Amino acid sequence: MNALLPLPTAPLPPGAVHVPGWLTLDQQRELVAACRAWAVGPVPIRHTRLPNGGVMSVRTVCIGWHWQPYRYTRTAGDVNGQRVAAFPDWMVRLGRRAVLDAYGDEAAAAAYAPDTALINHYDGQAKLGMHQDKDEKSSAPVVSLSIGDTCVFRVGNTETRNRPYTDIELASGDLFVFGGPSRFLYHGVPRILEGTADPATGLTSGRLNITMRVTGLTDTHPTP
Ligand code: MD3
Ligand code: FE
């Protein structure tokens, strides 16, 4: 019975908001150009090394603050020692519009002050295992923007990296905001749907994901 009907998608947890097609093609093109410049330097995009000796399949470049497992610093001691590029004001404004459109809360949007972004590039084989983002000393929302190939995005729970979770697809131009009770959810990217991108974004292959965050750090109170 009903074998030809799609299964209903489980509702997203409170605080998790998906806005498909939020970015225009022009905005995607501008973001691709900005990310392409940041990928060159001052700290080049690279596969992050993990403390266990492994290497992430995703390539990452950071702006504002540099993330390496499991802390933020201003300089990239695990890459070339340079200070990362500044977090631009235009991206703060984009983050505020994202929070406003996701929650309809003008006060929350005005108060949102992202100071770092992790920019991930996935080739067709790259994956991101289930994890929590908890190196930030703030529970402010994370704003995620996707460009290029569609991916399967796994939205988990706050207790374990295993079930229950829901798989959804994130396509080019989609906005996802994780705030409130969803801020410390386990999540991951089990699969890229290779070749699904519209080349008009300027991205020649793979998937680009930008996550804006609030580190909760200051230069007078950095992590040691
Ligand atoms: C939910 N990136 O960079 S974006 C990451 O597609 C990361 O590159 C994935 O997970 C990517 O840490 C997923 C969506 C996302 C990002 C951060 C979150 C979801 C989140 C933080 C808390 C809860
Ligand atoms: Fe994450």
Image: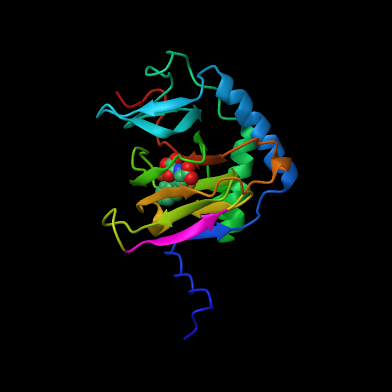
The residue positioned 48% from the left and 53% from the top of the image is 152
The residue positioned 46% from the left and 69% from the top of the image is 11
Q: Main secondary structure of the magenta part?
A: strand
Magenta segment range? 164-170
Residue 20 position (above or below residue 11)? above
The residue positioned 61% from the left and 37% from the top of the image is 205
Residue 40 x, y percent position in the rendering: 58, 20
The residue positioned 70% from the left and 41% from the top of the image is 199
Residue 183 position (above or below residue 66)? below
Whether residue 133 appears in this view of the structure is yes
Residue sitting farthest toward the top: 81
Q: How is the image coloured?
A: rainbow
Whether residue 132 appears in this view of the structure is no
Residue 137 x, y percent position in the rendering: 35, 39
The residue nearer to you, when weighing 112 against 101, is 101
Looking at the image, residue 220 sits to the left or right of residue 5; the answer is left
Please give the count of numbered marks on the rendered protein. 0
Looking at the image, residue 21 sits to the left or right of residue 214; the answer is right
Tell whether position 173 is magenta.
no
| Quadrant housing the C terminus | top left
Tell whether position 168 is magenta.
yes
Residue 161 x, y percent position in the rendering: 29, 53
Looking at the image, residue 17 sits to the left or right of residue 135; the answer is right
